[in-house]
């Protein structure tokens, strides 16, 4: 009976996810405000239903009271976040907010099933992130001087990454954390701010070369720290930002060629790069060593198939670092391949939303920031999902908002709220323009009326014999 | 009123072109991720979930009764009996006969029990039945695995080997289906749990080792196929070679002699192959050199991964710098070369199949408990070892062995055959393992075999008669 319930819940969760994903793309269409609000509310309802079903299953399988407590806390968190945003920022992008909640929900469900303590910690950190998320749009509006701090961003970024390299302890073969934080997650944001502020006003060859040098410094420190995933994210972000700023396709080609050459050099220079590649080419052949992690991940994805094993029915705990970098494999195993495809689509809609915002912003600094952050997000999703499915070599980065990891959650939430801040600014800008235009039209009409009034008076006069 | 807006539009478009391109790029990336996931789930995942390293499905046994393993001709090779109290017992009706190939399911898993574990523990019965079972808390019946193994051929090989140690493997060259696989000494999988400690501690017999796929033997004269092929690849023909065999050859103080020091007299490469003349092949080896032999050997999958990770890699040690005595030894199949019977059988298969090795398979079909087809194995080629021309040439050499060489015992049985014998010396006294690799029906090869009898003497003495019995048995089946 219990098995049957779990089995059925699997399809319920999948259906809710599919419908949610549909709304993500449906909502991009232009429609009236009322329709949009209704669709957004439906999305929220779908999230709540999914969380409820999933955690009910986890509770039935584990019989732990903590699950119920966690469920209540999680619901309170989402309710507060959604409510306060609506009160404080009427102009915010509610679709972006919904997607953030959905991605976090999936993370919470998996963590609750994998490791209760981590789930609670993640929720606590998210609550902290939520406070930031509520403050940041306000700060963005107030702090107009942000665009003038290029050198501060560069200095902070390089100093912190350097500090990690020198001081941090090694975990999973890479130097990542300092005082329990992963600075590279935060530096992702300052890096984009640096690029945007340094290049938003004037673009000379000299400036491009200096920006390239600073970017290269970031990347090199990360490669030496063996944080290959972050190094790649920085590099790609740099490349696309330079392309968008210069509007020269050849920079993109040049950069790609340079990146390819650097990858080949890294392959021959660093043993850990070769290991990743050998684990990618034939993981079963090196199962005992570097292939173990990816093989366990593929076992999980393969065993899950299209519909998954159902929550608490698989063995995702066999995958090393499953809570962090390999959470996607656990999702595939228990919730299934179709659910995972929907998750990728939600991530894609999340990215498209960000680019869409950046397209509409007119201020070049904000425009570049939105694009840079969007690029970082999309490429990170590609690295982690591509890595755990053996599409590309595994690099060990988190799936933003879904994976367990304090710094990752906080920095992604900061990133999202910066974008919200920019979106709100733009909406207000639009409204401002709209108001100005209305005024102008009004004035023009008055003038016209005044003129025609006079003319008609004059013509009437002249008509009079 | 629309004038200011119109003025803005053309200015805005070009500025955003790059942004659009970036978003298109990433949309393609997301789509490729989805595409890969679909591709993985459809085509690749089987390779991984069926890996013996995957222990995930063991938890399935809480909800599924392990399926049966059946032979090609419909006999049960392994099945699970569920008793009234819910306890389960795995039984193997043929006991020792299929011990290695079917394997065991206690103290870990081996053979098909390991390879097909995922299918045996997956249930594809009608979903309403499955839901009913779930509702009542009953286990679902696992899928059955229909193998390519044939009980007649397996028992012929098993009985022919008798109490001797060794291995036999029989395949269809055209499809790669494995029809029989015997390894001795063996064990009884029914009592493996109680015999385990004794089996593991008995270092002399290594009864648990599947010698057919994981034995490592010197190839003896069966290796002369490789030497002859390398000669052909270097010279472009076999016709020009002649040699006067005096029964003994000495180079750099190292002496090699033919079996019983028989002087074969004037020989061509064909007759030297048929006679299995060591002197002539040592001479050929010196002419070819270590580097060339190595290149050809590696093209025949020596030092290379074989179709399955569970198959032992064959080793070949010659290089361009190897000393002449080692080159001579290696060219006649001694030296440091070690092969598994399965690898030699694949070479025979390639010779019989125009140079192409098909991927060897043991599983024909997966059927659900009601007998409905779940999955069927399709033959796929694994590698091309020879050109069609080379395959014909090797076939001709191997026919010579049966017609007027060391395997004439296979003549006059109502079918044609081709093959190569081998006597692989393994100690100083000249004791040797007896080898035969070959195939039945030269015109349209039906089955290929590799037979090794440890300490069985020459190929003609022990291995050829076993191959003959298998070829005969195959004829009776038709």
Image (cartoon, rainbow, N blue to C red):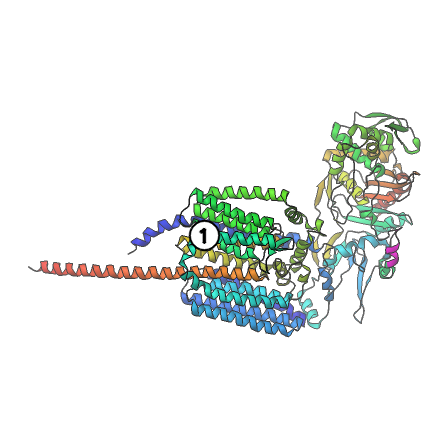
Residue B293 in picture, x, y percent from top left = 77, 33
Seen in the picture, residue B478 relative to B291 is either above or below; the reply is below
| Residue located 81% across and 47% down the image | B214
Residue position marked by numbered label 1 in the rendering: A150
Left or right of residue B269, residue A335 in this image: left
Please name the predominant secondary structure of the magenta segment in the image.
Answer: loop
Q: Which residues are magenta?
A: B197-209
Magenta stretch contains residue A372:
no
Q: Where residue B458 sits in the image (x, y, percent)?
A: 90, 39
Left or right: residue B344 versus residue A148 is right
The residue drawn where x is 61% and y is 64% is A110
Residue drawn at the location 53% of the way across and 60% of the way down: A411
Image quarter (top left, top right, bottom left or bottom right) of the N terminus of chain B: bottom left
Residue B321 point in image, percent of width and height: 77, 32
Task: State the residue at coordinates (9%, 58%).
Answer: A462
Position above or below: B259 against B203:
above
Element carrying mark 1? helix
Camera-side residue of B201 and A422? A422
Mark 1, Cα crowd under 10 Å, few <14 / some 14-19 / many 20+, is some
Residue B38 visible in the current orientation: no
Task: Please identify the residue farthest to the left as the structure is shown.
Answer: A465
């Amino acid at each position: 009976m219990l098995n049957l319930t779990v089995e059925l819940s699997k399809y319920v969760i999948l259906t809710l996810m599919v419908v949610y994903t549909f709304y993500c793309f449906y909502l991009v269409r232009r429609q009236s405000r009322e329709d949009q609000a209704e669709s957004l509310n439906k999305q929220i309802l779908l999230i709540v239903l999914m969380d409820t079903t999933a955690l009910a299953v986890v509770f039935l399988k584990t019989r732990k009271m903590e699950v119920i407590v966690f469920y209540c806390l999680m619901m309170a968190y989402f309710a507060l976040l959604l409510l306060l945003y609506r009160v404080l920022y009427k102009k915010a992008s509610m679709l972006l907010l919904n997607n953030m909640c959905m991605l976090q929900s999936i993370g919470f469900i998996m963590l609750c099933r994998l490791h209760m303590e981590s789930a609670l910690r993640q929720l606590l950190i998210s609550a902290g992130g939520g406070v930031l998320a509520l403050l940041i749009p306000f700060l963005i509006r107030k702090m107009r001087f942000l665009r003038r701090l290029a050198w501060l961003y560069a200095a902070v970024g390089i100093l912190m990454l350097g500090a990690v390299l020198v001081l941090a302890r090694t975990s999973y073969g890479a130097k990542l954390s300092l005082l329990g934080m992963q600075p590279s997650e935060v530096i992702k944001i300052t890096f984009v701010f640096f690029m945007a502020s340094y290049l938003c006003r004037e673009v000379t060859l000299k400036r491009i070369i200096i920006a390239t040098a600073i970017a290269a410094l970031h990347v090199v420190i990360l490669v030496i720290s063996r944080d290959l995933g972050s190094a790649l994210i920085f590099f790609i972000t740099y490349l696309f930002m330079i392309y968008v700023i210069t509007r020269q396709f050849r920079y993109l080609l040049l950069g790609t060629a340079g990146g390819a050459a650097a990858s080949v050099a890294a392959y021959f220079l660093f043993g850990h790069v070769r290991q990743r590649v050998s684990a990618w080419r034939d993981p079963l052949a090196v199962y005992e060593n570097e292939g173990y992690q990816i093989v366990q991940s593929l076992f999980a994805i393969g065993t899950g198939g299209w519909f998954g094993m159902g929550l608490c029915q698989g063995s995702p705990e066999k995958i090393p670092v499953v809570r962090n970098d390999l959470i996607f494999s656990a999702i595939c195993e228990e919730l299934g391949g179709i659910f995972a495809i929907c998750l990728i689509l939600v991530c894609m809609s999340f990215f498209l939303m960000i680019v869409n915002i950046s397209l509409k912003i007119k201020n070049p600094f904000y425009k570049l920031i939105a694009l840079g952050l969007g690029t970082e997000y999309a490429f990170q999703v590609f690295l982690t999902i591509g890595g755990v499915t053996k599409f590309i070599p595994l690099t060990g980065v988190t799936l933003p908002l879904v994976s367990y990891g304090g710094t990752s959650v906080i920095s992604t939430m900061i990133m999202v709220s910066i974008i919200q801040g920019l979106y709100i600014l733009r909406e207000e800008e639009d409204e401002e323009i709209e108001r100005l235009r209305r005024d102008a039209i009004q004035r023009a009409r008055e003038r016209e009326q005044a003129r025609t009034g006079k003319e008609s008076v004059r013509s009437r006069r002249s008509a009079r014999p | 009123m629309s004038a200011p807006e119109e003025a803005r539009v053309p200015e805005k478009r070009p500025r955003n072109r790059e942004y659009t391109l970036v978003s298109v790029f990433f949309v393609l990336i997301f789509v490729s991720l989805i595409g890969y996931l679909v591709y993985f789930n459809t085509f690749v995942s089987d390779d991984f979930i069926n890996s013996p390293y995957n222990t995930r499905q063991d938890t399935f046994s809480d909800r599924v009764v392990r399926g049966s393993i059946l032979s090609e001709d419909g006999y049960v090779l392994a099945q699970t009996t569920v008793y009234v109290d819910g306890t389960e017992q795995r039984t193997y009706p043929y006991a020792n006969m299929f011990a290695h190939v079917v394997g065991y399911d206690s103290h870990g898993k081996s053979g098909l029990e390991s390879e097909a574990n995922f299918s045996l523990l997956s249930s594809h019965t009608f979903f309403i039945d499955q839901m009913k079972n779930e509702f009542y808390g009953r286990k679902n019946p696992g899928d059955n695995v229909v193998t390519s193994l044939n009980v007649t051929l397996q028992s012929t090989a098993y009985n022919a080997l008798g109490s001797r140690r060794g291995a036999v493997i029989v395949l269809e060259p055209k499809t790669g289906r494995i029809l029989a696989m015997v390894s001795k000494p063996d064990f009884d999988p029914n009592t493996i749990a109680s015999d385990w400690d004794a089996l593991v501690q008995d270092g002399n017999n290594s009864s648990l080792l599947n010698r057919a796929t994981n034995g490592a033997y010197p190839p003896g004269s069966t290796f002369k196929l490789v030497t002859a092929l390398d000669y052909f690849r270097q010279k472009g023909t076999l016709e020009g070679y002649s040699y006067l065999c005096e029964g003994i050859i000495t180079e750099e103080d190292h002496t090699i002699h033919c079996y019983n020091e028989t002087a074969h007299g004037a020989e061509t490469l064909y007759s030297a192959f048929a006679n299995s003349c060591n002197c002539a092949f040592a001479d050929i080896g010196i002419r070819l050199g270590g580097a060339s032999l190595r290149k050809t050997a590696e093209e025949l999958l020596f030092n290379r991964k074989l179709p399955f990770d569970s198959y032992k890699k064959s080793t070949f040690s010659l290089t361009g710098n190897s000393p002449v005595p080692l080159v001579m030894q290696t060219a006649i199949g001694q030296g440091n070369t070690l092969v598994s019977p399965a690898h030699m059988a694949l070479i025979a298969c390639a010779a019989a199949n125009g140079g192409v090795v098909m991927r060897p398979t043991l599983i024909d079909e997966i059927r659900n408990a009601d007998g409905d087809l779940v999955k069927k194995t399709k033959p796929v080629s694994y590698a091309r070892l020879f050109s069609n021309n080379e395959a014909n040439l090797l076939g001709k050499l191997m026919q010579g062995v049966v017609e007027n060489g060391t395997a004439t015992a296979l003549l006059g049985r109502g079918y044609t055959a081709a093959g190569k014998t081998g006597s692989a010396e393994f100690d100083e006294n000249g004791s040797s393992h007896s080898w035969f690799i070959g195939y039945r029906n030269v015109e349209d090869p039906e089955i290929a075999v590799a037979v090794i009898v440890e300490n069985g003497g020459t190929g003609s003495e022990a291995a050829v008669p076993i191959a003959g019995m298998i070829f005969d048995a195959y004829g009776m089946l038709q």
